[in-house]
Image (cartoon, rainbow, N blue to C red):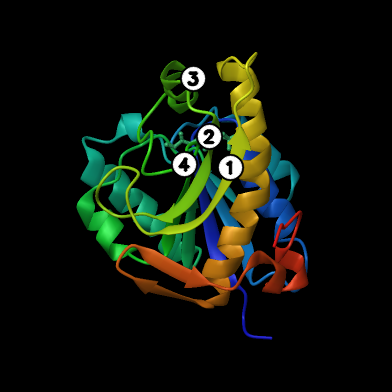
Amino acid sequence: MTARRRTAILISGRGSNMRSLVEAARAPDFPAEVALVASNRPDAPGLTIAKQAGIATAAVDHKIYAGREEFEASLQKLLDIHRIDLICLAGFMRMLTAGFVERWGGRMINIHPALLPAYRGLNTHERALADGVKIHGCTVHFVVAGMDEGPIIAQAAVPVHDDDNAETLAARVLEEEHRLYPQALCILASGDYTVDGNRVRSKLPGMLAPSCRIGARD
Ligand code: GAR
């Protein structure tokens, strides 16, 4: 087997998606290993979860830096020290500069709680409910300079129920996020995909390595 890609997960809070990636990457044939979990918020509960899982953690507190460039320079140093190949943004609520994004082009992915290109930005569940959509979901995509833009690697849809509120809908979407993100990281880390404009072509979930198929639907 080729070397597993050394992956950093960047978080800002709870870290439930980070946890699902860590759990998936425990399988020896998963093509990525989680080498670092870093947060821009030192008090992020996700850091404690990662520590307990025996993963290297770091806090890079954005508030102590003069600006975004200085914050990112410090983050980049950390990524270099840990010889990181890939980055997963998992509830990382900090805009990254075009320079940082370009440097990690094709090697950094994000999970967003909506079916992009619908509902970029914040409060996706509230806005979906206000619009009365019947289908909502989540997306994993390559990170590019525009917010919540970039070629889509994987999506999952959930129904919106008549009695949903933002919390119940968020919970249904989150369950799908936890299934989807490991699959998308698996696709990225295995290198088994092509990108043509905004279109990413990869194997169907059912064709992925067994460790990448947690809860996969073909
Ligand atoms: C997730 O729902 C993720 O999709 C969302 O934040 C939550 C983080 O939860 N990300 C964004 O809104 C990014 N624009 P988690 O910390 O439990 O993974």
Q: Amino acid at mark 3?
A: Leu
Sequence-wise, the earlier of marks 3 and 2 is 3
The residue that disc 1 covers is: 157
Sequence-wise, the earlier of marks 3 and 1 is 3
SS at mark 2?
Answer: strand
Left or right, residue 216 beside residue 170: right
The residue that disc 3 covers is: 129
Distance of label 3 from label 2 (alpha carbons): 9 Å
**Mark 4–mark 1 contact, CB under 8 Å?**
yes
Question: Label for residue 136?
Answer: 2
Query: Mark 4 packing: few (<14 Cα in 10 Å), some, or many (20+)?
Result: many
Residue 77 occupies which quadrant of the picture?
A: bottom left
The residue that disc 4 covers is: 115
Q: Quadrant of the N terminus?
A: bottom right
Which residue is at a point 56% across and 55% down the rendered structure image? 36
Distance of label 1 from label 2 (alpha carbons): 6 Å
Query: Mark 3 packing: few (<14 Cα in 10 Å), some, or many (20+)?
Result: some
